[in-house]
Amino acid sequence: MAYKGITTITMLLFVSTCGSVNDKEILINRKPIIDKVEINNNREKTILNNSDTDISKYDTYLVETDQYTTNGVHYHKKYHKHLIGIARIIINKKGLSIVKNSIGFYFDTKESAKNRLYLGLDIDIPHRANFDNKPYTKIAAMLLKEHIDNILYTIHSCRSIFTEKEIVGMVIGLLWKAKGTKELLSIWIDKKDVLRYEDNKLTLDELILRNPITNNQGKIIRLPI
């Protein structure tokens, strides 16, 4: 009987200890999750921290609503303040030039799926002397690596937009001049890959390689990453 009693006490202590450890682990593991939610909420609040002056000042960078042929017009109106915030942050905080009437919701004409929308914008890159001595693909790869992180972070701060089923990702366009010719590339990024990238499950190179990039003619191209 004594032997059984000791065994029972030992088992109870073991169960009790395991329960305590698990509870501690849950509490420890929960904190980063809470912090991440708070960080994401703060990111979105920063985007929405617009004044009436901002709306009048940055509205010209948004797509004109009568240009939509998709349900993008609905999201444009619903998230108008988010779009204004994107313009404000990228121009004032990131120091980049946004092409006017370019912030809005796009669909990929190659897919002809008007119910799959991408939140996007075009960035005008100032001319550099070395642009004239490099091929298109090398300039494109260089500019993506220089700018995509900041732009992606700002756009993805609009977390509410990316909870919409029809919003499947983001499209970032980069424009520049080389030898007097206007050049363009657009990268169409799946929103799941954006999450993977922010969670350090994808490198920047992997993000670029996994998602389609189109040129001036809308043809998919490969870059020397």
Image (cartoon, rainbow, N blue to C red):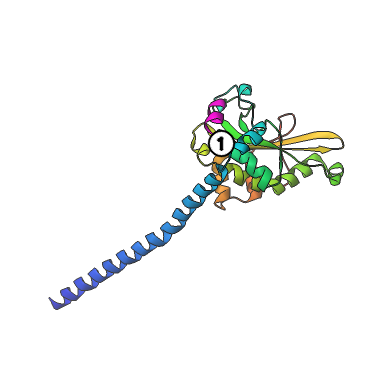
Mark 1, secondary structure of its residue: helix
Whether residue 170 is visible, yes or no, is no
Which residue is depicted at the point 52% across and 49% down?
42
Which x, y percent locates residue 66? Answer: 62, 21
| Left or right of 11, for residue 148 | right
Which x, y percent locates residue 97? Answer: 72, 40
| Left or right of 46, for residue 184 | right
Q: Which residue is mark 1?
A: 81
The amino acid pointed to by label 1 is Lys
Nearer to me, 131 or 109: 131
Location of residue 111 with respect to 123 vertically, above or below: above
Which residue is depicted at the point 82% across and 37% down?
177
Q: Which residues are magenta?
A: 73-79
Whether residue 105 is visible, yes or no, is yes
Query: Residue 107 lies in magenta, yes or no?
Result: no
Query: Residue 77 lies in magenta, yes or no?
Result: yes
Main secondary structure found in the magenta portion: helix
The picture quadrant where one finds residue 18 is: bottom left
Residue, far front: 53
Which residue is depicted at the point 53% across and 44% down?
44
The picture quadrant where one finds residue 22 is: bottom left
Which x, y percent locates residue 219? Answer: 71, 31
Which x, y percent locates residue 206? Answer: 63, 48
